[in-house]
Amino acid sequence: MRRPTSFLLLGLVLAANAAETEIWRWKDANGVVHYSDSPAPGAERVQSSAPRPSTPAPSFTPAPGEQSAAPPPLQAGERYTRCAVLQPTNDQTFFAVNTVAATIAVEPALQDADRIQVFLNGALYEDWPLNQSSATFANLFRGSYSVTVRVVDENGVVKCSGPASSFHVQQPSLLSPQRPRAR
């Protein structure tokens, strides 16, 4: 009975201190990215947020008769002026999650014949709704991820492409060398 209680108390202490933990990132000689709670030579500090579940941004639906503040649709010959990943922000770090909510911006409003394509680590993310500005990346493991967005027309011609945005998912490990050993 003492051991489960000890683990429960340890879990509570770790959860309470997670927001205060410094996180460091560095690349080794082979180019592999490492994360740690203690700095190594050449390491840089990573901003992290307290552990919390990632939820999609709330959507706003105007009341009946009320006008929406959405930008007007494209006119003939006009181009998209913005395709960008809003959430997660660049280099944002998530701790102990396996889903991350994402939001993108396309300006002016998406045309009926056009569709959104979102790429996660260079591969088309098939679960992204073709005309939605928010969705959730699911089943994420620890590591770094890159997200890009583009708008294509019905023929697959790219009409807008946005810059890449990176985010990081960290998971606790029972095999951490900094973890105190049981006696």
Image (tube, rainbow, N blue to C red):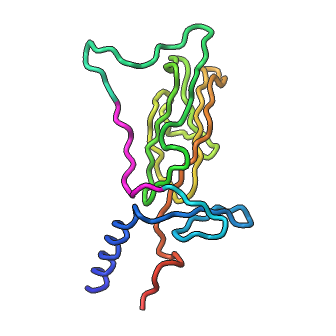
Quarter where residue 90 is shown: top right
Q: Viewed as shown, does residue 95 lie left or right of 26?
A: left
Residue 39 percent location from the top left of the image = 58, 69
Query: What residue is rendered at 56% in x and 64% in y?
Result: 24
| Residue range (magenta) | 48-59
Point out residue 164 in the picture as x, y percentages from the top left corner.
61, 40
Picture coordinates of residue 171 (x, y %)? 47, 63
Residue 37 vs 79, above or below: the answer is below
- Residue drawn where x is 40% and y is 61% of the image: 19
Would you identify the image quadrant in which residue 180 lies?
bottom left
Query: Which quarter of the image is occupied by the N terminus?
Result: bottom left
Q: Is residue 58 magenta?
A: yes
User: In the depicted view, which residue is nearer to us: 53 or 44?
Assistant: 44
Q: Nearer the viewer, residue 9 or 125?
A: 9
Q: Residue at x 34, y 35 (%)?
A: 58
Relative vertical location of residue 158 with respect to residue 176 in this rendering, above or below: above
Residue found at x 43% / y 56%: 97
Quarter the C terminus occupies? bottom left
Instruction: Tell me where residue 67 sits by quadrant.
Output: top left
- Which residue is farthest top? 76
